[in-house]
Image (cartoon, grey):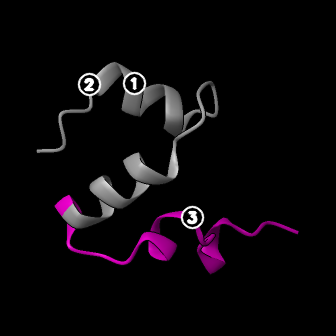
Amino acid sequence: MTDVSRPYLNRIESGEANITVRQLARLAAALNVEPAALITPDAQDERA
């Protein structure tokens, strides 16, 4: 898919690792979404 390991993706998702802009672009392309869609919080995630 993006040549990014699953453990690295897990670390990014959990906040243990930072993603580079290049990796963000590659991941977005693989998912067929705009990069902003991956870093913009969903309305459901915004807890008051």
**Residue found 46% across the figure and 75% down from its top:** 37
Total numbered labels placed on residues in the image: 3
How packed mark 2 is, by other alpha carbons closer than 10 Å (few <14, some 14-19, many 20 or more), is few
Instruction: Give the residue pinned by disc 3.
Output: 39
How far apart marks 3 and 1 lie (CA) works out to: 17 Å
Position of residue 19 relative to residue 35, above or below, is: above
Residue type (three-letter) at the residue carrying disc 1: Tyr
In the rendered structure, the answer to whether residue 36 lies left or right of residue 8 reads: right
Residue type (three-letter) at the residue carrying disc 2: Ser
Q: Where is residue 28 shown, x and y percent of the image?
A: 31, 64
Q: Where is residue 18 shown, x and y percent of the image?
A: 60, 35
Disc 3, disc 1: CB below 8 Å? no
How packed mark 3 is, by other alpha carbons closer than 10 Å (few <14, some 14-19, many 20 or more), is few
In the rendered structure, the answer to whether residue 41 lies left or right of residue 8 reads: right
Q: Quadrant of residue 7?
A: top left
In the rendered structure, the answer to whether residue 41 lies left or right of residue 29 reads: right
For the N terminus, the image quarter is: top left
Instruction: Give the residue pinned by disc 1.
Output: 8
Res 5 label? 2
Q: Where is residue 26 shown, x and y percent of the image?
A: 28, 54
Position of residue 21 relative to residue 47, above or below, is: above
Residue type (three-letter) at the residue carrying disc 3: Ile
Disc 2, disc 1: CB below 8 Å? yes
**Residue found 42% across the figure and 29% down from its top:** 10
Segment colored magenta: 30-48
